[in-house]
Amino acid sequence: MFEGAVRKQLDEVLKKYPTKQAALLPALWMVQQNKGWIPDEAMSETAEVLDVTSAYVKGVVTFYTMYHQHPVGENFVQVCTTSPCNLCGAEDVVSALLEATGCAALGETSPDGKFTVIEVECLGACGFATPILVNDDFIEDVTPKKVPEIVGKYRDGKA
Amino acid sequence: MAEDQVTLKIEGVDVTVPRGTTVLEAAKRAGILIPHYCYHPGLPVSGVCRMCLVTVEGAPGLQIACATDATDGQVVSVFDSAASDARQAVLEFLLINHPLDCPICDQAGECELQDYVFQEGRARTRYSDYPKRFSPVEDFGGDVLYVPNRCILCTRCIRFMDHVAEESVLNVSERGDRAFIGIHPDAVLDHPWAGNVIDLCPVGSLISKDFLHKAYAWQLDRTPGICTGCSQGCNITIETRDNSIARLRPRTNEDVNRYFMCDHGRFEYRWMNSGDRIEAPLVAGANGLVATDWSQAIARCAEIVKGVSGKAVALVSPRASCESLYLVHQLLKDFELLSACPVEVVEGEQPLPGVPNLALRSERAPNVEGAARLGHGAEYDKALEAVKDAALVFVLDDGYSQFGDDALSGSENLIYLGTSLPDAARNSSVVFPMSNAAEEDGTYVNRDGRVQRYMQAKTAPGMARPAWWITGALLSEIRGTDAPATAGEVFDRMAASESAFAGLSYETLGTQGAFANKASGAGVGCDS
């Protein structure tokens, strides 16, 4: 896992911290960016390069919902459904997203492998309900009507 | 007032403790138990359970007693309404997902959750409308089962593995109400000392496969003992149910094993429960061994011992008490005696890294040191060789020796004190049924020279008697001296004649033991 360019990237990150252990979160991001999720073997490799135990890494990975413990679709969609967004119709956005992406349910991956949709707590854009996060892109004021176009773009890789 | 001492008031009780003592430990000294889960004296403090909240006068809010240092003039209250309410709230949180399966839980009766809820919890739940979280039981490996539903996430097990066993395989996985104790998928909880997590667990979450559903805590009788697994001499509690040992657990001794014992030691009760026992004295007749009573067997044996002289061989078990080993020597002191005990040696110690001078030792017997100090050597093979030329062969064995079928053949006068009757002992002149280590009082000397008492935990089967009683009765028959009535009396005699034990008595040994004298001078202690 931590070879070549990724190793270089890790070495850069390590310079910023007083201990190797402190670089665990960024190191796990690197794993996720490269593999799409964090398999058990990758946790062991991360543990080895950072001199911590696999059990410790596993504890951290499972603590944060941002790390995927299972493979997810090419595009990872997070919809805010916390109170203000909920009042503004976030539930309908969720339904529209599920329909447009073809995902059977929240947390499941579409048959074409392109999408996984999950609900998240407040994305910090209550004034622009409903916000969604597609991969690293933040999209505000999403309504059920706008959903098919957004999903289409990402499906075709034009986003 | 010494500089390094502080005096504080806990629940109106003044208590003086060394500076650096926590409020929780200070309270213990004042006789007040502050409820706690994550705190354990053998582990680093983590302060996660919030159960030990107390009111400290002048402090801004409630303080956790496990991580608050006692200071001079501090006034602490444990059972005032603020602290009690806070702890009641902690208990209420813990019970949201904790199952009400106490009737089938191995921890019931010795569960700290049960105890504290009974003591200061709410009478009724306010969460009866909500389903409880459910996760299946997981096999952690070794002797350990994990029941996540019962877990209160105190993290004692994690800290034990991280800081005491120093093999970090456990973690807290997930978070919030989904959190549970996780183990890395490639790891197994098979560290030689891993069983301690079961004792450390304050609830029934980590449980022993070996003890699973064997007994309720309140059905067990508990007796202080010494582990027979190796020469470390860990202090243990023998827990019996219906005269059968159900499990062994560590007994606190800061100088020997602190709060721990190894997994090897935990299973050292099985041989003690063995059913293949001799239950009556036997004497050789025309058609082999015949059962008889004690007085006849003692008389016959005394007759044999008095009738021969010259070379004698004694083969003794390193699990025998100092008392019986001492009397064996007394009994045979007029002979040209070669005495030895077999000691199983397993290469490679299994240390518990977090505790100094604690390991499963290579010498797998509890009284190797005691036997040596009482003149029973280690040249076992030589002693076995000498059996065929000896005028008298005296065996004291509780199944440890595993005699080959012909090991004792050729000895004319074979006196056999044993728990079972191996084929090798079929040609004995007299066989005495002996109690095993769990069935008698006695002392062992550990590898560091610490003399430690163990007490009778169960009754011996049939007519079996402790080896010290048998040898004492023989001595009395042969020499006309008083037979000792108790093991303590034998110990006193030993202390009077053996310099290694001089000045010691059962009273001074107590339950924590005391060191034998370094220089073992005259007496039977030096046969070489």
Image (spheres, coloured by chain):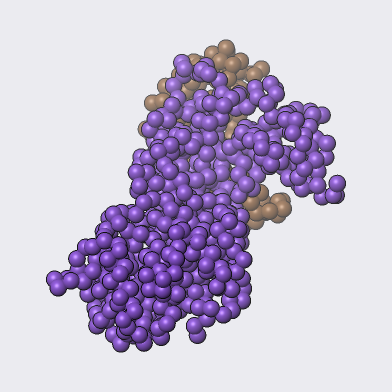
Chain colours: A brown, B purple
Which picture quadrant has residue B49?
A: top right
Q: Considering depth in this image, is B525 or B310 the residue closer to the camera?
A: B310
| Number of numbered markers | 0
Query: Does residue B468 sit above or below B384 in this rendering?
Result: above
Q: Which residue lies furthest to the front in this view?
A: B480
Taking depth in this image into account, of B378 and B364 the one nearest to the observer is B378
Q: Where is residue A157 in the image (x, y as percent from the top left)?
A: 49, 35
Pick whichever, A58 or B469, lies toward us.
Answer: B469
Instruction: Examine the rendering and report whether any part of residue B10 can be seen.
Output: yes
The percent coordinates of residue A119 (x first, y second) are: 52, 25
Whether residue B121 sits left or right of residue B249 in the image: it is right
Residue at 21% in and 63% down = B291
| Image position of B245 with respect to B90: above or below | below
Residue lying farthest to the left in this orientation = B287
Q: Quadrant of residue B434?
A: bottom left
- Res B141 visible: no
Residue B449 locus on image (x, y percent): 57, 68
Residue depicted at x 35% and y 48%: B244
Residue at 77% over, 36% down: B14
Q: Which residue occupies 38% across, 66% down?
A: B473
Residue B224: % across, % down: 49, 51
Residue, far top = A87
* Side of A40 where A129 appears, left or right: right
Q: In this view, does B338 lie above or below B46?
A: below
